[in-house]
Amino acid sequence: MSASLSPISWDAPRPATRRQRLPLGLKLAYTAFMAVLVPTYTYYYGPTNFLYFCDIALILTLIGLWTESALLISLCAVGIVVPQVVWVVDFAAGLFGRRLTGMTDYMFKSENSAFLRGLSLFHGWLPFLLVYLVRRLGYDRRAWAAWSGLAVAVLTVCFLAMPAPRPDPGLVPVNINYVWGLSDTAAQTWMPPLAWFGLLVVGIPLALCGPTHLILRAVMPPAIRP
């Protein structure tokens, strides 16, 4: 009995190859920026400066760009897009002589290095970059839980081990991530320190990142997991 051979179909689909979803130029430009920022911040501020959520996001974004990891990019987006947009609004108000929250006051102090202030402008473009990246890679719904756990761990380290506010902090990072209040020169007096810390531990995941998670999940395409 002879076996019948089916004809070869030259139109048969080939195995899918992984397409680069992010422009190489963007990856190189961001890497060049980080190659300047990281050693500069380390020299002037010290390594503890990278405990700030925005700086953590900078590093995770660098890794996420090259690995095209939707989870890492989503982590950063759910964690810092809203605070950085507030920074943009506050800075824009300062340009017109208005003071809103005071979080960008340092950008208008002439005694601060113009070069350092220039680097700090990343607060202005990073949230928009993250929105673009999430749009390209998709939003990973695990991001909210992952960032919440990371945030609580970092807040605990900042509260227990990092310097508290002081009248003349200089360039040394103090009150990192506002674990002692909203001022770098004096701790808040509205409530006991542990109550304030507890408010951050609960409020950042639920009141800040929670709504961001719901919005990103609703308006962004879902990430395609391997």
Image: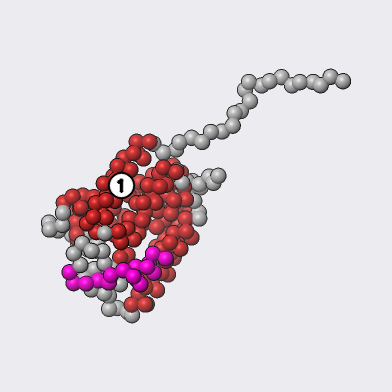
Residue 2 in sight in this render: yes
Q: Residue at x 44, y 59 (%)?
A: 147
Q: Which residue is disc 1 drawn over? A: 34
Figure coloring? secondary structure
Whether 196 is among the magenta residues is no
- What is the quadrant of the C terminus in the image? top right
Whether 159 is among the magenta residues is yes
- Residue 93 percent coordinates (x, y): 21, 56
Segment tinted magenta in the rendering = 153-168
- Residue 101 percent coordinates (x, y): 24, 64
The quadrant holding residue 200 is: bottom left
Residue 80 shown left or right of residue 113 in the figure: right
Q: Crowding at label 1, few (<14), some or many (≥20) Cα neighbours within 10 Å?
A: some
Q: Residue at x 37, y 77 (%)?
A: 195
Q: On screen, 61 above or below 18?
A: below
Query: Which residue occupies the foreground of this view, 217 or 9?
Result: 9
- Residue 83 percent coordinates (x, y): 33, 58
Residue closest to the far right: 1
Residue 82 in sight in this render: no
Q: On screen, 9 above or below 134?
A: above
Residue 194 shown left or right of residue 219 in the figure: left
Residue 143 shown left or right of residue 57 in the figure: right
Amino acid type shown at disc 1: Met
- Residue 175 percent coordinates (x, y): 28, 68
Q: On screen, 205 above or below 22?
A: below
- What is the quadrant of the N terminus in the image? top right
Q: Residue at x 19, y 56 (%)?
A: 107
Query: Which residue occupies the foreground of this view, 208 or 114?
Result: 114
Q: Residue at x 38, y 36 (%)?
A: 24
